[in-house]
Image (tube, rainbow, N blue to C red):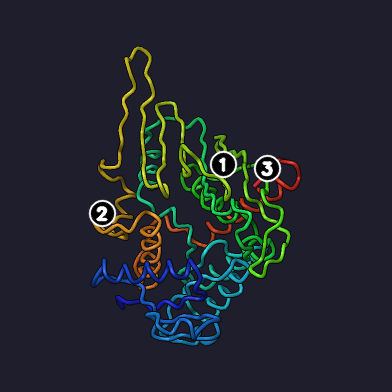
Amino acid sequence: MNNLIGFGLAGFGMIGRTHLTAMQANLALHEGSVNAKPRALYTRRPGACADLPFEKIYASLEELLEDEHVKVLDICTQNNLHAKAAEAGFRAGKGVYCEKPLSNDQAEAEKLLTLAEKSGLPNQCALTMRFRPMVNRMKDMLEAGAIGRVIHFRVCYFHNSYIDAAKPMTWRQDLEQCGGGAVMDLGIHILDLTRYLLGSVKRLRAISRTLHKTRITKEGVSVPNNTDEYLQADVETESGIPGIMECSRVSKSIIGDNLFEIFGSKGTLLLHGKSFSDLAFDAAVVPGAAVSEQVLPNNAKPGKLESELRPLLPDIRQTMGTFADSHAAAIKNMANWASGLAPFSGTPVFADAVIAQKLVHACLKSAAADSKWEMV
């Protein structure tokens, strides 16, 4: 078994930098174990990236895919370029690790899934919330019946980095390039999380709003902003559990920007904190009892899923924060899979990414049709 798996990055914007940082951290924190090695980079700015710790820098994706030392293609380009790069990766015999979404087009994503499954190669999407320890502790507790029968839920994922009307326009506000605004950027994570924790979604209906109808380009030109900046959806799972999902790029919550609260017949679970890093459990008030008992399970004994995840994460004394840790764990998981080791059982494979994308498109379709229920 080769302990160092050559990764080839396509694209080097913010998320590409995050992936490289995760690889370098894993090499230091998981010394001697299977790790991703930053073998190659494809970028349109090869001269500007000469000092980066890649062995090879290529000016085309084709050149990178011809590199026999690249075993995994890591796609960090803008959204509308994901699918074609992933298809090329599979056809070149590479495992593919792709940022979300797989594509802006649902039919194209379905076609890509067929290719991935036919190839038999490792395939993983960067739906990284599945690699957060308290998410898996929540799932372990739900499966153990800690809160009894689930009654309903609510989930929100906010930030306000787009609230400034003067923020320069990028591809993220161009629907053709990004495929969706807040719901594709943030909502896709919590829609996938809803499936992961509570099971398949049966139907949903949504409304969306755009705060700034125009944006200013870097050249100072005012152009239309045709993406959602806030979206809210009523969601119902296949098992009949109702919930509310909200995502926003123009909101700052006083209570908390990241919340996933699940209400049950025996208590409530709350996933909260920066990057969904903390978990609280409040037992239901039993008739005749003086007061409910509150337990913060962060230091409790890990369950099955959390125990499986922990070896992929940095030691608690070496944490880089939940966001960075989850990216590092996800990339280490992909390297493990490419080396022949079994992947984490909660791995978001392309089949999961296709469903998450389908939920996003259902939200956008419903919002465009005055909140019509969409069966998914």
Residue 34 location (% of width, % of height): 30, 71
The image shows residue 134, relative to residue 241, as above or below, that is below
> Would residue 214 be found to the left or right of residue 78 on screen?
right
Q: Dot 3 surroundings within 10 Å: few (below 14), some, or many (20 or more)?
A: many
**Closest to the observer: 157 or 2?**
157
Q: Which residue is mark 3?
A: 207
Q: Considering only order in the chain, which callout, 2 or 1, is on the residue closer to the N terminus?
A: 1
Residue 45 location (% of width, % of height): 53, 82
Q: Dot 1 surroundings within 10 Å: few (below 14), some, or many (20 or more)?
A: many
Q: Dot 2 surroundings within 10 Å: few (below 14), some, or many (20 or more)?
A: few
Which amino acid type is marked by label 2? Ile
Query: Are the residues flagged by discs 3 and 2 in contact, CB closer than 8 Å?
Result: no
Q: Please identify the residue farthest to the top as the structure is shown.
A: 288
Q: Which residue is mark 1?
A: 245
Disc 3 is placed on an element classified as: strand
Q: Considering only order in the chain, which callout, 2 or 3, is on the residue closer to the N terminus?
A: 3
Q: In the image, what residue occupies the spot 40% across and 83% down?
A: 51
Disc 2 is placed on an element classified as: helix
Residue 15 location (% of width, % of height): 48, 66
Residue 212 location (% of width, % of height): 68, 51
> Would residue 334 be found to the left or right of residue 240 on screen?
left
Task: Identify the mark at residue 316; answer none if there is no mark.
Answer: 2
